[in-house]
Amino acid sequence: TYTGYFPMIFRKAREFIEILFGISLTEVDPDHFYVFVNTLDLTCEGSLSDEQGMPQNRLLILILSVIFIKGNCASEEVIWEVLNAIGVCA
């Protein structure tokens, strides 16, 4: 099994999420409860956005929410359905 590798994989995933998206996964409880914390200090007015003006961090949170709701695994098709529903076309 890969149980012994989990701490290393989790640490690397946390590092990549922070580097790529500017979001830190922070432990808030000794029972291993975590929250996402924005490390870029961007407000909605000052956040990086695409050409249509939708802040990128909102898209990230939406996609992560879909993945969570779908049981921590969402197909590309499901993600695109949600994005198309809010006007982000493939």
Image (cartoon, rainbow, N blue to C red):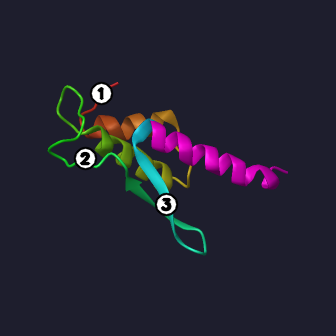
**Residue numbers of the magenta segment:** 1-19
Report the predominant secondary structure element of the magenta stretch: helix
Disc nearer the start of the sequence (2/3)? 3
Residue ID at (62%, 44%): 12
Residue placed under numbered mark 3 in the picture: 26
Q: Quadrant of the C terminus?
A: top left
In three-dimensional space, the C-alpha distance between marks 2 and 3, rounded to whole angstroms, equals 18 Å
Circle 3 packing at 10 Å, graded few (<14), some (14-19), many (20+), is few
Residue ID at (38%, 37%): 81
Q: Amino acid at mark 3?
A: Thr
In three-dimensional space, the C-alpha distance between marks 3 and 1, rounded to whole angstroms, equals 32 Å
Dot 2 falls on a residue whose secondary structure is: loop
Identify the mark at residue 89; answer none if there is no mark.
1
Whether 82 is among the magenta residues is no
Nearer the observer: mark 3 or 1; the answer is 3
Disc nearer the start of the sequence (3/1)? 3
Q: Amino acid at mark 1?
A: Cys
Q: Is residue 73 visible?
A: no
Circle 1 packing at 10 Å, graded few (<14), some (14-19), many (20+), is few
Q: CB under 8 Å between callouts 2 and 1?
A: no
Identify the mark at residue 42; answer none if there is no mark.
2
Whether 15 is among the magenta residues is yes
Residue ID at (28%, 49%): 41
